[in-house]
Image (tube, coloured by chain):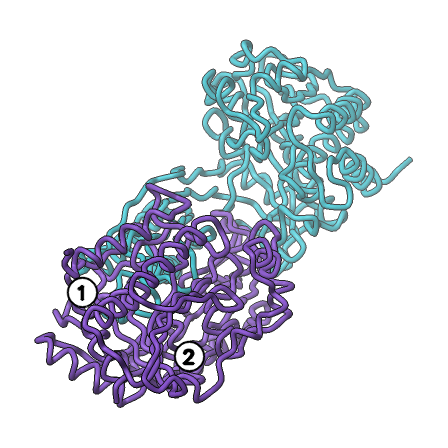
Chain colours: A purple, B cyan
């Protein structure tokens, strides 16, 4: 019989083979042949672990272990199995395999929980095909709308609804995926950290207390495109200098407000973009994340204040803001966090309470249930790239912590 | 008989009609049908002004007025008649028409100069078709090479040599265009300012004393692309922050060293360029121009010092520099400058000694002769765009100043 480590490794490697870009990282977009093959593998593994498997109206795979009280609210555990383009083997699958492995262990140990347990594998969390992301969890919590299915398209112009139909799902039934508040007791997700904190601290398991809120704002600075050789420094309206100083201000404000707040300018375009023309327009994006809404607002206020300061007194300089993303911080359930910490301790593992700076399906599921979110270390903090990696024994630490916790939640 | 103003206006409007992009600014690339028609117009106008017209080996049109001493060195006057893509009606043609109008006036007045005068119309100064620019003047001064003709291509993959052949010129004879040192007494060029100084000061004529030196350096900053949500501020290697602070340092250094020194970051690319990824690489260009080589070096030193400061102590941050353009400042001839100032004064016009922040054919011609470069005001300082404009009476001021000066130079 294979060890747990061997099973985990086999699952990761099996799923990694369903890949549209072998040799260039993992690409498994939703409603594709890679998706279909991966879903088949997951379904078979669930069935071998004694689960009753179905697929919900939008494609989420649900493997159910019955409880002694079939009417009791469900403990749910899992993550997503789609990927970004040219990503890695762990973002998503690590959490799906956590469900598979937990099901196997409970099945082998003959555990009969009081609450039914549903092990789930969601799709289109990344939004890499249709742009929106968190698809399975939004469908389950009633946040998915008919308009999105009819109008959101992939780069080939295929709508989400058309892709579902070609995959064998009827988009008209999307609302059948909705689960009601009270129906689900807990949602427990394991995910790779995608950051450097656990690797640096040496802790085995991260227990997320808060998923950060996000404000992403598009800033357009308009100046005047002038000849870079013939326009004196004091007669310019240089849109890039305004953008550069604003980006620095956002950065400094995030450091100043603290509480783990981060601000990033990762996308910026200079127009007309010639080495010998003073920039006439710059469009850039400030991404602000924090567990504290006040901190997010403070950074945004610093950005706005800097833009006002820099454009005041120069009639040729102006700016405009457009809010692109706006989510509030989400809290994990304190009781679940405590159980996760106790489970880790029982297994002899160090754990660390932490923030999640990225959004995950658990963040959406918090709308209708009490969530727990567990992180395992990411080598070098890398993610969404072929180098994304978590050693299998480190992944096993997280999986065993979740397994123990799910069993407790299902039996309490 | 038409007034001088009417003739100038008619010339500008006639040349503006030879345009590949009517309604979207002027586009007249080298060795095209628009080029051929404009050349024909210029040739006819030169012939009507009594000039003996020929085209040199690379396409420069030369209209010669014989002197009483045919062996005396030539006074040369003119500019270029190619354009950028979607440019204006004045950049280049203003100086060509200055030659035409000067020839007409001398012809009408029966002036017989001691020195021969050659009125010239060059091509491919902008480099808008083959990328290199200053083509006619480089050919005339021996700076053009066979390799360039064989390897520089337009966006359709046509080499300069192929385009010349299709136009009726034999590229093998390119060296026949070379004029020797001593053969040309002066080169006088009128050009629009392409900046705001004359408009702001109200002076009629700018007399360029120095064409700035240029250093354009490509800076590549390498950092580490990390997840913008999960990577704490103190664990980042953000390539864009380094670029932003370096651009600001370049700007401040240019202001600090003074002497009209300018520094511009007009082109910048952020990679991977996603709003939620910390920039892993930024490539940008610092364009530094000054009449003083020391000032250029001081700004470059400030850029390098800032890059060293920002990348020191973070092993994940590094930078590399690549010199893209490097020209030394060029001086106009003091005697020519004095004659230009005297001529303007005689005409009742205010003049102003100034810098040229842009390169022109005169800058190249300074290799083999004593140059003079005259600026006329550009409305709003705008150039290389459809809005490029100089009022015809303001252009006439410059033309008459050049006409008076050319006559004096040819008769002294």
Residue B193 screen position, x and y as percent: 60, 48
Who is closer to the viewer here, A142 or A42?
Answer: A42
Front-most of A82 and B79? A82
Tell which residue pokes out farthest to the right in this image.
Answer: B1
**For residue A121, side relative to residue A284 (left or right):** left
Residue B340 lies, with reference to residue A262, above or below; the image says above
Tell me where residue B340 appears, x and y as whole percent. 60, 41
Q: Position of residue A92 (x, y in %)?
A: 34, 63
Residue at (24% x, 62% y) in the render: A381
In the drawing, does residue A234 fall left or right of residue B118?
left
Label 2 Cα neighbours within 10 Å, binned few <14 / some 14-19 / many ≥20: many
* Residue nearer the viewer, B214 or A42: A42
Left or right of residue B188, residue B276 in this image: left
Q: Secondary structure at mark 2?
A: helix
- In the picture, the disc for residue A396 is 1
Mark 1 crowd level (few <14, some 14–19, many ≥20, 10 Å Cα)? many
User: Which labelled disc corresponds to residue A365?
Assistant: 2
Q: Secondary structure at mark 1?
A: helix
Can residue B296 be seen in the rendering of this structure?
A: yes
Q: Residue at x 11, y 74 (%)?
A: A349
Q: Can you see residue B241? A: no
- Image quarter (top left, top right, bottom left or bottom right) of the C terminus of chain A: bottom left
Q: Are marks 2 and 1 on the same chain?
A: yes
Q: How many marks?
A: 2
């Amino acid at each position: 019989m294979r060890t747990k480590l061997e099973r985990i490794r086999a699952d990761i490697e099996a799923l990694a083979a369903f890949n549209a870009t072998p040799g260039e990282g993992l690409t498994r977009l939703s409603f594709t042949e890679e998706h279909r093959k991966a879903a088949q593998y997951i379904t078979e593994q669930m069935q071998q672990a004694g689960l009753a498997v179905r697929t919900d109206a939008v494609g989420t795979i649900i493997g159910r272990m019955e409880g002694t009280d079939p009417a009791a609210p469900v403990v749910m555990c899992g993550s997503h199995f789609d990927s970004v383009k040219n990503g890695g083997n762990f973002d998503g699958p690590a959490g799906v395999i956590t469900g598979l492995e937990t099901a196997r262990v409970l099945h082998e140990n003959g555990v009969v929980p009081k609450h039914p347990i549903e092990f789930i594998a969601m799709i289109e969390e990344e939004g890499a095909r249709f742009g929106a992301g968190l698809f399975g969890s939004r469908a389950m919590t009633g946040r998915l709308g008919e308009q999105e299915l009819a109008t959101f398209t992939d780069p080939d112009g295929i709508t989400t609804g058309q892709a579902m139909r070609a995959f064998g799902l009827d988009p008209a039934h999307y609302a059948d995926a909705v689960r009601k508040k009270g129906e689900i007791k807990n949602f427990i997700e394991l995910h790779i950290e995608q950051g450097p904190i656990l690797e640096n601290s040496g802790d085995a398991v991260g227990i997320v207390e808060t998923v950060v809120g996000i404000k992403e704002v598009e800033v357009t600075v308009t100046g005047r495109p002038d000849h870079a050789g013939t326009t004196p420094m004091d007669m310019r309206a240089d849109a890039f200098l305004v953008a550069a100083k604003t980006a620095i201000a956002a950065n400094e404000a995030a450091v100043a407000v603290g509480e783990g707040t981060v601000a990033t300018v990762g996308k910026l375009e200079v127009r007309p973009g010639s080495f010998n023309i003073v920039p006439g327009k710059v469009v850039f994006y400030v991404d602000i994340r924090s567990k504290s809404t006040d901190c997010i607002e403070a950074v945004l206020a610093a950005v706005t204040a800097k833009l006002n300061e820099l454009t005041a007194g120069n009639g040729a300089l102006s700016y405009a803001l457009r809010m692109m993303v706006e989510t509030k911080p989400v809290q994990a359930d304190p009781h679940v966090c405590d159980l996760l910490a106790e489970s880790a301790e029982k297994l002899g593992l160090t754990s660390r309470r932490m923030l999640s700076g990225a959004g995950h399906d658990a963040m959406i599921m918090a709308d209708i249930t009490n969530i727990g979110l567990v992180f395992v270390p990411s080598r070098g903090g890398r993610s969404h790239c072929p180098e994304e990696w978590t050693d299998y024994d480190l992944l096993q630490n997280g999986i065993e912590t979740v397994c123990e916790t799910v069993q407790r939640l299902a039996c309490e």
